[in-house]
Each structure stands twice: as C-alpha cells, then as structure tokens.
Image: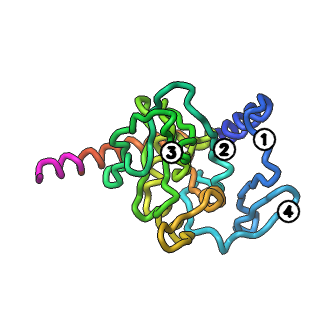
C-alpha cells in the first residue's frame, strides 16, 4: 500500500539522518493465506488472531503504536520563561488545550520536559478514563508538556487529525484503561500505548473520515450552544 510504503521510507530516512534508532523489535502485521493474522518481529512469526479486536475494512491494516509513532523527545527551555501544558490545561470534554501556563524556568515543575510540535496529540497517562486528550495546534507548538502525557507524533502512517480522532475514540480509551495500575493516581505506561494495536486506513481515507467527523462535531457543538 502506498501510504504504508511512504511511512516506511520516512522511517528509513530518519534512521539514516540519525534522528531515530533502528527498532530491533519492529513488528509487521499481515494476513496469511489461511486468512489468519500474523506478526513478524525479526525472524520470529507468531499467530495473533487472539489479539485482533475486530475486522477491518478492505485496505486498512493493524499496526503497533511503536510502528506508527515517532519516539518521544525531551526538551528544556533556554529562555527565562516558558509555556507549560499540564493536565489542568486540557478541557477533557472538548478535548482541547484551554491555555498554557506561563512560568519562570527557575520554577519549572520536574515533569516539564516533553517536547511537542504542531500536530502532536497529548494523551494523559494518569487516569486515562478522564480523557485528558488534545491535539496540539500551531499556537501551542512552542510549549513544553508534562511527562504525565504520552506525546503521539505520527511517523507518516497517520494524519495528525486522524491520529487525534483515533486517540479520543472509545476503542482507544477503553482499551488502554484496562492497563491502569495504582490506587491514588491510577496510570498506564508508555509501553501500554506503544504495544497496543491501531487500525490504520489509507491516507486518502483518513482525510475523508476527518472531514465527516469535523462536520458531525461542529453540528453537535452548535446544537449544544443553542441549548445553553
């Protein structure tokens, strides 16, 4: 498939540029002649029929998170002040960033180290059932996020907006909730997100889906405003 080949080419380019390391555990999920699903990691091939949650439309593929997301990066501000996105900055009903906090670097929380960019999707690792999830728009692309977030950046397999809709979906939220651990602040891990299975359509189909979802959500938002 073209979109998958493009994603693989981008990954090879990043490896060649030294921006990411080659993943020795990279997985390839495919359907065999017996119609079963298999995953190839290195030289090992394993049947994963029992892990497939549902059938996909023609042209879609299953992909592990570590095969469709770029590695997260850490950063520190070089200025006196910086803009910080923590859990409190997220509107978990609208799944948007309400406002970043303007802080002195000298007073930066220890968690303030996640790099973000335009098109990143923030997914809270803490109490994921609260759905503190948001798409980073251009105006927040200079911010630094809390390590309480997993920062999703597509390696080319996912359009940023589709990635956002996927991460706020009931499928993703409910699937990841099962991994919560801890009593006071139940959380999931980076590995939970990166090892989970993501349904990936071709890029052209992602665009169509995003257009339809945007239209639907706009209608819902307008109805809500008219009733308030």
State which quadrant residue 199 falls in: bottom right
| Comes first in the chain, label 4 or label 2 | 4
Q: Nearer the viewer, mark 3 or mark 2?
A: 3
Magenta segment boundaries in residue numbering: 221-228
State which quadrant residue 46 falls in: bottom right
Crowd band around label 2 with a 10 angstrom C-alpha radius: few (<14), some (14–19), many (20+): some
| Comes first in the chain, label 3 or label 4 | 4
Which percent across, then down, holds residue 95?
37, 49
Q: Nearer the viewer, mark 4 or mark 2?
A: 2
Q: Is residue 10 left or right of residue 101?
A: right
Crowd band around label 1 with a 10 angstrom C-alpha radius: few (<14), some (14–19), many (20+): few
Image quarter of the N terminus? top right
Residue linked to disc 1: 21
Foreground: 210 or 160?
Answer: 160
| Comes first in the chain, label 3 or label 2 | 2
Could you say whether the residue bearing mark 3 is in a helix, strand or loop?
loop
How far apart are labels 4 and 2 at the CA level?
24 Å
Could you say whether the residue bearing mark 1 is in a helix, strand or loop?
loop
Residue linked to disc 2: 71
Q: Residue at x 62, y 68 (%)?
A: 52
- Vertical placement of residue 111 versus 191, above or below: above
Residue linked to disc 3: 109
| Comes first in the chain, label 4 or label 1 | 1
How far apart are labels 4 and 1 at the CA level?
21 Å
Q: Is residue 57 visible?
A: yes
Residue linked to disc 4: 44
Residue sticking out furthest to the right: 43
Crowd band around label 3 with a 10 angstrom C-alpha radius: few (<14), some (14–19), many (20+): few
* Marks 4 & 2, CB-CB < 8 Å contact: no
How far apart are labels 2 and 1 at the CA level?
9 Å
């Amino acid at each position: 498939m073209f979109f998958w080949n493009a994603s693989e080419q981008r990954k090879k380019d990043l490896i060649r540029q030294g921006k990411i390391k080659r993943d020795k555990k990279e997985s390839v999920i495919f359907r065999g002649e017996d119609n079963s699903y298999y995953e190839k990691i290195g030289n090992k091939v394993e049947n994963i029929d029992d892990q497939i949650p549902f059938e996909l439309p023609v042209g879609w593929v299953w992909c592990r998170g570590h095969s469709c997301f770029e590695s997260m990066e850490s950063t520190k501000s070089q200025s006196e002040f910086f803009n910080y996105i923590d859990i409190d900055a997220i509107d978990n009903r609208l799944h948007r960033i309400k406002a970043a906090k303007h802080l002195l670097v000298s007073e930066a929380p220890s968690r303030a180290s996640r790099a973000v960019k335009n098109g990143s999707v923030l997914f809270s690792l803490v109490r994921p059932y609260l759905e503190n999830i948001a798409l980073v728009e251009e105006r927040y692309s200079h911010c630094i996020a809390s390590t309480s977030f997993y920062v999703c950046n597509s390696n080319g397999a996912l359009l940023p907006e589709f990635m956002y809709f996927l991460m706020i979906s009931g499928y993703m939220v409910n699937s990841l909730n099962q991994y919560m651990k801890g009593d006071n602040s139940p959380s999931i891990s980076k590995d939970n997100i990166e090892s989970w299975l993501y349904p990936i359509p071709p890029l052209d189909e992602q665009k169509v889906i995003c257009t339809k979802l945007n239209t639907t959500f706009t209608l819902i938002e307008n109805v809500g405003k008219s009733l308030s």
